[in-house]
Structure formats: structure tokens, C-alpha cells
């Protein structure tokens, strides 16, 4: 048997310090996971986590130039710690969830905030607000063997050199193990899955030409220019 069209390219993210690649299956995101960002979005800060997805080919491995998307006048950044899974399953106990993690990266969840607001108001899906082309820049993946499981330390983002988001991983309402465990009650997770774990306060609107630099202590930095 042969394919009727050329098969789509395998999506992969480079692993830090080497030439190895992490092959991507699915990309999940936590809707809100830092109390101060939930507050700035006008939401209850003690709700259980909720999830949405981005297509794997929305990733922009290594960052760099990202095309300013169509159909928005309010593109916003969300810097996030990204978890890369080497193992999965359904109903993963929180106590064993961290054993599933291969490593961690810095990611930016780019969001058409105006379309998201319309979707919220109308009860429509978020897909076109969250899962558009190039909506998920991601840095290199740092293996647990090298960086452990980051649970505290700075998570930040600057725009044109000015601080916009400044938080700490310890502000996460649902910790990485809890996020994995909870998500695995909805879907069976598998090797190759990525999870964007939410963003601290300070999300702001960016324009074509802006330079975004995002970082997480111990997990490196990621640079994106909107073109
Ligand atoms: Mn997000």
C-alpha cells in the first residue's frame, strides 16, 4: 500500500545539548493555572484545571520568526512551562505522574484574545483562538536527567526588552504531577505528548515587529519575533 498524498512531516522538538529530537504526538494546554492570571481574566482561582488542545503542527520549535496571525487585533502571549512525556496511560496516580516526564521546555501559548472572548461569550470552542498556525513556539526540551522536576523558580517574558510577565513556578495552582494525573482522567496520555501548564499574570497585547523573549529558570529561554 502507498499513501495517496505525501504523508505529513513528523513533528519534533530538539532536545537541549545534542542533536536528538523529541517526537510529538499531541499538544495539551491547561486553561488557567496561576491564581494571579486567573484573577486578571476575571475567573475563580480555585476551580479544577480544564484543558484544551493545539495541533502538533502549531508548534514552532526553537522559536524565531512567527507570522502575525490573521483575524485578530488582540494577539497576546502566555509564557508557560511545557512538560514532555516519555510515558503515559489513563488514570495515572498523581504520586506516580512525574515518572512519566521526559523533560521540560519553555513555551509560549499565543492567543487571539479577541476571538477567545467572543468564543467565551457565545459558548463556542476555543480552537480558532488558541490552535492557529504557529501558535505554540517552544524551546529545546531539557531532560529530567539534566534538570530534575522544576517546581520553583522564575517564569518570565519580556517584549522589546520590557518585563511583561514575571512569576514563579511555585504559584502553579495545580502542580505538574497533578496536571498529568487530572488530564489522564479525560484522555489516555502517551509518549510524545506535550502539556503547556498555564501562565502567570501579565499577559499583554503584542504587535507585528515585537520581539518576545520568554524563560523559565533552569529550562532556558525562547525568542520569538512577530513578522
Ligand atoms: Mn495558556
Image (tube, rainbow, N blue to C red):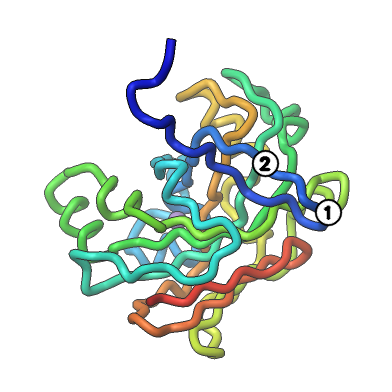
Asked if marks 2 and 1 touch (Cβ < 8 Å), the reply is no
Q: Which residue is mark 1?
A: 147
Q: Position of residue 91 (x, y in %)?
A: 58, 19
Looking at the image, residue 84 sits to the left or right of residue 135; the answer is: right
Q: Please, which residue is most extreme toward the bottom here?
A: 161
Looking at the image, residue 127 sits to the left or right of residue 159; the answer is: left
The quarter of the picture where the N terminus appears is top left
Looking at the image, residue 161 sits to the left or right of residue 207; the answer is: right
Circle count: 2
Say above or below: 204 vs 142: below
**What SS does tag 2 mark?**
strand
Q: Position of residue 64 (x, y in %)?
A: 53, 70
Say above or below: 183 vs 79: above
The quarter of the picture where the C terminus appears is bottom left
**What SS does tag 1 mark?**
helix
* Residue shown at 46% from the left, 75% from the top: 202
Observer-nearest of 209 and 201: 209
* Residue shown at 48% from the left, 52% from the top: 59
Q: Please, which residue is most extreme toward the top here?
A: 1
Disc 2 from disc 1: Cα separation: 16 Å
Q: Which mark is residue 22?
A: 2
Looking at the image, residue 210 sits to the left or right of residue 113; the answer is: right
Observer-nearest of 215 and 45: 215
Occupied quadrant, residue 73: bottom left
User: Can residue 21 be seen here?
Assistant: yes
Q: Position of residue 46 (x, y in %)?
A: 47, 49
Near mark 2 (Cα within 10 A), the count class, few <14, some 14-19 or many ≥20, is: many
* Residue shown at 49% from the left, 41% from the top: 27
Amino acid at each position: 500500500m502507498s499513501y495517496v498524498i505525501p504523508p505529513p512531516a513528523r513533528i519534533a522538538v530538539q532536545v537541549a545539548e545534542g542533536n536528538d529530537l523529541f517526537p510529538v504526538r499531541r499538544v495539551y494546554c491547561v486553561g488557567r493555572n496561576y491564581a494571579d492570571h486567573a484573577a486578571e481574566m476575571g475567573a475563580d482561582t480555585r476551580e479544577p484545571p480544564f484543558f484544551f488542545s493545539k495541533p502538533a503542527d502549531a508548534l514552532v520549535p526553537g522559536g524565531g520568526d512567527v507570522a502575525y496571525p490573521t483575524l485578530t487585533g488582540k494577539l497576546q502571549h502566555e509564557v508557560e512551562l511545557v512538560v514532555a512525556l516519555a510515558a503515559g496511560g489513563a488514570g495515572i496516580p498523581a504520586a506516580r505522574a512525574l515518572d512519566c516526564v521526559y523533560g521540560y521546555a519553555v513555551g509560549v501559548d499565543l492567543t487571539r484574545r479577541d476571538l477567545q472572548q467572543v468564543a467565551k461569550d457565545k459558548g463556542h470552542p476555543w480552537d480558532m483562538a488558541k490552535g492557529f498556525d504557529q501558535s505554540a513556539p517552544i524551546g529545546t526540551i531539557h531532560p529530567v536527567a539534566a534538570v530534575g522536576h522544576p517546581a520553583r523558580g522564575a517564569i518570565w517574558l519580556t517584549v522589546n526588552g520590557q518585563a511583561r510577565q514575571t512569576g514563579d513556578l511555585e504559584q502553579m495552582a495545580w502542580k505538574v504531577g497533578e496536571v498529568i494525573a487530572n488530564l489522564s482522567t479525560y484522555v489516555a496520555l502517551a509518549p510524545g505528548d506535550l502539556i503547556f501548564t498555564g501562565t502567570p499574570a501579565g499577559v499583554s497585547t503584542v504587535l507585528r515587529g515585537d520581539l518576545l523573549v520568554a524563560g523559565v529558570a533552569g529550562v532556558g529561554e525562547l525568542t520569538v519575533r512577530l513578522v
